[in-house]
Image: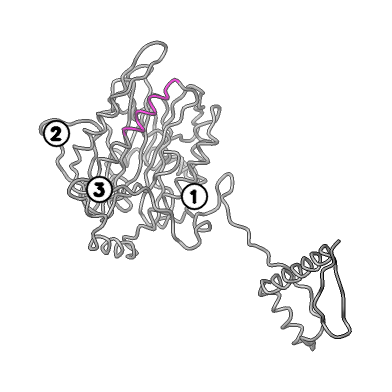
Amino acid sequence: MTPVAVPKEDKDSHATMTAEELKKLQLDGNATNEEKKDELDGDEDEDDEEDENLQAGGTSEGKKKKKKKKSKKKKVVQSAPPRVAVSKLFKNGVYPVGEEQEYKNDNISRISSAEKKELERLTHEDPETTYTSVRRAAEVHRQVRQYAQQNIKPGMTMTEIAEMIEDGTRALVEENGLESGIGFPTGLSVNEVAAHYTPNAGDTKILQKGDVMKVDFGVHVKGRIVDSAFTLNFEPTYDTLLEAVKAATDAGIREAGIDVRLCEIGDAVQEVMESYEVEVGGKIYPVKAIANLNGHSIAPYSIHGGHDGISGKSVPIVKMHGSQRDETKMEEGEYYAIETFGSTGRGRVIEQKNFGTLPFCRRYLDRIGEKNYLLALNTLVKEGLVDDHPPLVDPEPGCMTAQYEHTILLRPTVKEVVTRGTDY
């Protein structure tokens, strides 16, 4: 080996070292430097230990305690089933922004308008109009539905499925009366039932492998309601039906915007929806948009947009003609539920009263211990003080229906699909 000269430290120290010995010395030095770095990066609590030692009569010149490395705080993650409030996951109170889409035609310049950007900033900073509330509600919806999509299986009862969704919603939104909570009872409409079915006490209905189930649930924060729905199937027969309805909903969202006439959205939805066909058992069924179901505006604490005696706006999902065409325009700052329904049957629904379900759901009265309320509740309905929403059914025997829905916000600069996720 070739010896390597080492500089003199003093007149009495002379040494020669091999290359391997020098390398070891350098490594040892690096290790020492790393130890020093660890000491500098130590937790503030460890500095407190030294202060306490001095207060107890110790000196900084004394033998120092070996300091431990700073322990990393564990990141808060969602549980399964979901029970961790989203406010604990987003501690800074900033929730994900939904999908942003630019406006079209005369409103395309809004995205770069300094005036509109300033208006948007002021709107967001105002506690009464802030976008934080609806984005928090949307994040709750995304996390709850992600778990539901992974865990809803044939063989479960409708009540089990509804409670899975609603228990998760209550926990993640930190349910607190009018401050935050469930937007409306969970809809679990199966097969020919297109909407408004929710299980009540004594319901024994079980989800089957061949079923097509619409899952529609809402979340609110400070009255800002998100309304979003998806459809589940467990074998591929009706995959094309689901694809058609999802594509039609996306078409409606693309068409929507400030100054867009409501009837124009129906034109776009029906054109896409009815370009699909479903083959079942060798027979072809055209997919039809359900003509007497609509999307709707959403106002604070009002799922269908009505407020101060003014009715909300309805968003058609079929092309209207003549005097039926609603030329009403969408306006800046409005919230909408863009929802579409498709059917392999007649493309129209009727009320089926014998299901015996109501909008705020009898199951909720059972949950808080109320009993013997049916007579009084029916009286309120007859007097018009409570609106009933019976399940809506396509009467064509053997038909299937599907639904997809998103909540959108018409911000001054862009359209935000607040409930958009990686799933739909």
Which of the 4 quarters of the picture holds residue 403? top left
Residue projecting furthest to the front = 2
Q: Which mark is residue 103?
A: 3
The CA span between labels 3 and 1 is 35 Å
Mark nearest the camera among 3 and 2 is: 3
Residue placed most toward the observer, 212 or 390: 212
The CA span between labels 1 and 2 is 41 Å
Q: Position of residue 227 (x, y in %)?
A: 37, 44
Q: Position of residue 107 (x, y in %)?
A: 20, 50
Mark closer to the chain start, 1 or 2: 1
Q: What's the residue type where badge 3 is placed?
A: Tyr
- Quarter of the figure with the C terminus: top left
Residue range in magenta is 237-248
Q: Which secondary structure lies at badge 3?
A: loop
Q: What's the residue type where badge 2 is placed?
A: Gln
- Quarter of the figure with the N terminus: bottom right
Disc 2: CA contacts within 10 A as few (<14), some (14-19) or many (>=20): few
